[in-house]
Amino acid sequence: MTSTNKEPAPERAGSEWLVGHPDDTPSKRPRATKAEMEQRHAALVSLTYEHGPCSVRHIYYRAVVESVTGIAKDDRGYNKVQRALLHLRRHGDIEYGLITDNTRYVTRAITWHGTDEVLNHVARTYRRDLWATSDHRVEVWVESDSIKGTIYQVADKWAVPVYTCRGQASESFVYQAVEDWHHEPDPLRIILYIGDHDPAGIEIEKSLVEKLARFNDHVVYFDLTRIAVTWDQVEEHDLPGSPPKKEYGYPLAVEAEALPPNDLRQLLDAEIAQYVDHHQLHVLKTVEESERQILMRMAGEVA
């Protein structure tokens, strides 16, 4: 006798079988035609090269907004995008580096083959501290790893740290961040926050402010500003969302990944730039290049 509690069969590679979703029964849905799959793949390749590097979720939202063939705003649509991007990378249509995954990382000790290798590394990566003489220290806090992967190149350009809450930030994580502030207590801490515009996202932001204030205890002045996603951005960009799981004063729950990646990077770049002394930056870049040449000579890179 066949059990009525049998788990749905796993999804078959290369098919449009979709099972295991709430309220679904295992059933075979109509498969996309070859022409539809080719059209879908071409659109995803184009979107990835336009918006990458970014997460799968970012591409999924762009596919929803652009009405890519067969991609609806639901779990099935996301799964289709995820499978297609994997296929396209494996077949060389999309460079692997254009899709980011900051949820997995490796921890290892840094070792060297010798002092020459150390000197070469220092010479290549040497950077002056842009914020050493500034009245501000800028930080970026994000709700999720996927957002970090999308905006990290901007943060690296301006040499600002990125903190990932991964949902509600743990007390230990926030405590250590504030301890770092106390080593340089004078500059004003500017915190640029990026998170979902939904009940959970708003609560995560409020909780973060409370924890930062509690551990800081007025030692360092700080100012936290949500730069994305705001409701004005939802309306301006007509961002896709879902009915919120509970009332929070807005008709839609909108994930940060719904904002186009290039727009998000440009927004963050402009926000950080307003705190930079650009004349001092030019001076520092000149000094930095001179000092890099000295280091390269020490490493034997320059005659």
Image (cartoon, grey):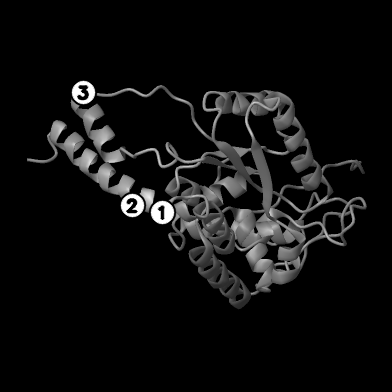
- Whether label 1 touches label 2, CB < 8 Å: yes
Q: Quadrant of residue 93?
A: bottom left
Q: Amino acid at mark 1?
A: His
Could you say which disc has been placed on residue 278 in the image?
A: 1
Q: Sequence order check: which comes first, mark 1 or mark 3?
A: 3
Where residue 22 appears, as percent x and y from the top left, is 86, 50
Q: Quadrant of the C terminus?
A: top left
Q: Quadrant of the N terminus?
A: top right
Q: Secondary structure at mark 2?
A: helix
Q: Nearer the viewer, residue 298 or 290?
A: 290
Q: Which residue is mark 2?
A: 282
Circle 2 residues within 10 Å: few <14, some 14–19, many ≥20 = few
Is 122 placed above or below 182 here? below
Q: Residue at x 70, y 51 (%)?
A: 11
Q: Which residue is mark 3?
A: 115
Where residue 56 appears, as percent x and y from the top left, is 60, 54
Where residue 36 appears, as percent x and y from the top left, is 63, 75
Is 119 placed above or below 35 here? above
Q: Which dot, 1 or 3, sits closer to the camera?
A: 1
Q: Secondary structure at mark 1?
A: helix
Q: Sequence order check: which comes first, mark 3 or mark 2?
A: 3
Residue furthest toward the left? 303
Q: Residue at x 56, y 26 (%)?
A: 180
Q: Amino acid at mark 3?
A: Thr
Q: Amino acid at mark 2?
A: His
Direction from residue 52 to residue 285 in the image, left or right: left
Where residue 60 appears, as percent x and y from the top left, is 65, 61
Circle 3 residues within 10 Å: few <14, some 14–19, many ≥20 = few
Q: Nearer the viewer, residue 280 or 163?
A: 280
Q: Residue at x 52, y 55 (%)?
A: 274
Q: Residue at x 44, y 24 (%)?
A: 108
